[in-house]
Image (cartoon, rainbow, N blue to C red):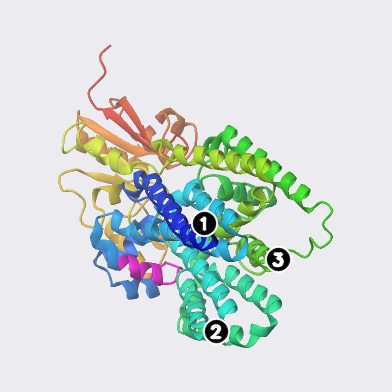
Amino acid sequence: MSAAVESRARPAASALLLGGLVILALGLRLPSFSGALWGDELATNYVVNGFGVGDLGWILTHGKEATPPLFFALTWLTRWFDDTEGLRLVSLLAGLAAIPLTYLVGLDTVGRQAATVGATLVALSPFQIFYATEARAYELLMLLCLLATFALLRALRSGRTGWWVAYGLSASAAMYTHYAAIFVLVALFGWAFLSHREARRPLILATLGAALLFAAWIPEFIDDTGKQAAKNIELIHPLTLAQAKTDMVRMWFGSPLLDVADVPGGLALALIAASLALGFLGLALRLRGTANWWPPSRGVELVLALALAAPVGAALHNVVAPSVFVPRNLIASWPGFALLVGAVVTAGQRPIRTASVGLLLVGFGIGAVKMLDGENRRPEVAAAAAYIERTGDPGSPVIDVPQITPGPQTAFEAALAPKGQALPAGRPIFELGLPPFAERLELNRRGQSLSQAGPAVPPDQIARQAADAAGNGTLFVVGPPGPLGQWRAFPGAPASLLAALPQRFHEVASRTFGSSAFGIGVHVLSGERARP
């Protein structure tokens, strides 16, 4: 094949490969794209849909949300798509777009082979699958940091004003998406400032332009840093060496909520470890006898800076402010990590390189396939609600024992009324440990936490009210998975609730939706006395 023909065929082959990766990634993400909202998605639902207490801008500036507005504004535009899918559409599209953009950044830094591996890892990563199907800002944050990187590389190469403007705009947009963008943006600026002395003037001007664009939000940024949401990570997930190790391994190889022994699993981890060992062996053999192997190329330096920017930045942030070190806040470094791994496993000669790349992709592929299992995705709260609807009488009461909710709704309430509408009439629903839904809305409107609410209905009172509503019929208890008997062993509201239920109620069925680690359990109790 002539050089001219090969030069024309290569972009076409790359486009075909990237198109295949995007289609593969979409297929891996679609099973997690639907279903009820859960966790922090409940806060997005409240911000975007308003629940009748205020518009988007008002809620962002007066509510408890401590994240900048861009993701919510884009999601407000897509909310019409469906009840839950519309809230996740921005994340899905951003996650898919990150695949070819990772390739393009890799092409300019570590070469075609490493870029191909890096883009493939973004497509297969369980961590990426999870956040590409979550109604939060993290995938958009990653995409915009990638876009800033790509624009900066093109600006440095061409010197064109348009690329410098694109760099400044994308950097500002990243900051308007999530404050964690600052870690990668600082790394980008530092790398470019030190390695491209000739471009310091346009670099500084473009960065100042980005800062001026973000300046309008600085008062809200200062306000956000004082909100409880900005302090919750420090309270719930404090930074320790052991926790940081767990977080990093989950981010690189697994899912944010599952042990890596489950996803990707022991076999996958062994394959990935063998791949990296072969990759470093191939790299060592390639560099053997090479006198000028250090310093590495500018491209490798940039990829290394990107991979380390968010973890190192978040760790340093912990010195002067409440911790933000949690896997989702480190996601902007994920493409840099993928490209760095791609550079390692493709460094050797063909026999070693082929084996290293093959083992790596099989290992990540195992993790990707495991994400298709319902037990490894978010709790299927909608399925739990549907199970209740088809079991018992339409008026059978439900006692909801919710996890901590970041918005006014619980996950079960969101499954029944996704956009904050009134809960279904005719079925009494009691929330254990929470004030009534209307009071929670009012607290969010005021920017107050649930701790500032009046006293919740006591568990024994809820037990009596639910028992009276059930009579001798069916009573549902929705809460953490596992036998109800486990609740009695720990003092607290659930144990008090069970102790206060009349003795005639006994469990006749139990279902778990999602994994035993973070699923949702539905316990069916009957008020009809058990036959001897």
Instruction: Point out the tag, 3 or 2, that comes first from the N-terminus.
Output: 2
**Are the residues flagged by discs 2 and 1 in contact, CB closer than 8 Å?**
no
Q: Is residue 32 left or right of residue 301?
A: left
Q: Earlier in the sequence, mark 3 or mark 1?
A: 3
**Is residue 488 part of the magenta span, yes or no?**
no
Drawn side of residue 39 relative to residue 205, left or right: left
Q: Amino acid at mark 2?
A: Ala
| Whole-number angstrom distance, CA of label 3 to CA of label 1 | 29 Å
> Which residue corresponds to the image point at 57% horizontal and 45% vertical from the top-left?
253
Q: Quadrant of the C terminus?
A: top left
For label 3, the residue is 297
* Residue shown at 69% from the left, 46% from the top: 349
- Give residue 307's position: percent from left, percent from top: 62, 60
- Residue 320 lies, with reference to residue 488, above or below; the image says below
- Work out whether residue 259 can be spotted: no
Q: Name the mark nearer the viewer: 3 or 1.
A: 3
Magenta residue check for 74: yes
Residue hosting label 2: 206
Q: Could you tell me how far apart the alpha carbons at marks 2 and 1 are, in whole angstroms?
A: 28 Å
Question: Which amino acid does the dot numbered 1 rest on?
Answer: Arg
Q: Amino acid at mark 3?
A: Ser
| Disc number placed over residue 328 in the picture, else none | 1
Label 1 element class: helix
Above or below 92: residue 374: above
- The magenta region covers 63-76
Callout 3 crowding tier (Cα within 10 Å): few <14, some 14–19, many ≥20:
few
In this rendering, the answer to whether 234 lies above or below 526 is below
Q: Residue at x 62, y 76 (%)?
A: 189
Q: Nearer the viewer, residue 62 or 345?
A: 345
